[in-house]
Image (cartoon, grey):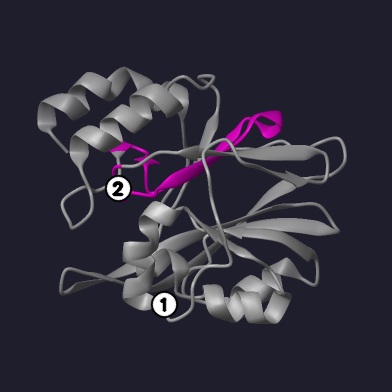
Amino acid sequence: MPVPTSPAGVRVERLVTSGVFELDGGSWEVDNNVWLLGDDRQVLVVDAAHDAGAIVDAVAGREVVALVCTHGHNDHVNAVSEVVAATGATAYLHPDDRVLWDMSQDAAPGAELADGQFFTVGDVEATVLHTPGHAPGACCLSVPALGVLFSGDTLFQGGPGATGRSYSDFPTIVESIRTRLLELPADTVVLTGHGDPTTIGAEAPHLQEWLDRGH
């Protein structure tokens, strides 16, 4: 699913890392998408998962304008401290997810995410959308100039992120998707926390199906 490059050269890069997700006494092997939004000088990193060395290699010496954590589950933040130490980046997390962050991290995140906040990378802006449900502080990043949404674990190909574990809620995630994400243009490419991309237009017709199945 191609994503355009901005006039000034800002592009999206994808890195897949592997590790273990742990919550509620269980553990699961997972592959995570680490997304980089940047040009040849600057980059924004979305979710530092599992493999700090691979992420630092992908940054390739560029200035990290921010390390955005879409939520606090360990598989999305377990490489944060090493990436911060290696790059001097500031890690951002929505304060409602500190309860999850603190389960796996010793140090506090560097700064707080807020709904409507934006980050500038080259000639594009990425805007924070607070989309609770999968986690209380779950956030997405919308990049209208590239027609892209970094959805974390809020929206996937096939429906909402999981809500069967602690600090998650199905009605809340559906409301977040309905009111914040499905309002985006239909051709918006959804770059997910795990697995393959989708589009808003591909997912929007299935809202009632998700409600009917209840997950």
Could you tell me which secondary element the residue under label 2 belongs to?
A: loop
Coordinates of residue 152 in the picture (x, y in percent): 44, 49
- 164 to the left or right of 7: left
What stretch of residues is rendered in magenta? 133-159
Q: Nearer the viewer, residue 201 or 149?
A: 149
- The residue located at (63%, 75%) in the rendering is 84
Q: How many marks?
A: 2
The x, y position of residue 31, in whole percent, is 40, 65
Q: CA distance from mark 2 to mark 1?
A: 19 Å
Location of the N terminus (image quadrant): top right
| Residue 53: image location, x then y, percent | 61, 80
Q: Please, what secondary structure does the residue beneath circle 1 have?
A: loop
For this view, does 209 lie left or right of residue 82? left
Q: Nearer the viewer, residue 195 or 212?
A: 212
Q: Which label number is shown at residue 69?
A: none
Mark 2 is surrounded, within 10 Å at the Cα level, by few (under 14), some (14 to 19) or many (20 or more) other residues, namely: many
Q: Is residue 136 above or below residue 16?
A: above
Residue 72 percent location from the top left of the image: 39, 61
Residue 75 appearing in the image? yes
Q: Amino acid at mark 1?
A: Gln
**Camera-nearest label, 2 or 1:** 1
Q: Is residue 5 visible?
A: no
Q: Are marks 2 and 1 in contact (CB under 8 Å)?
A: no
- Within the magenta stretch, is there residue 35? no
Quadrant in the picture for the C terminus: top left
Q: Nearer the viewer, residue 166 or 94?
A: 94
Residue at (38, 49) in percent of width and height: 153
**Is residue 210 toward the left or the right of residue 196 in the image?**
left
Which residue has dot 2 on it? 134
Question: Disc 1 designates what residue?
Answer: 105
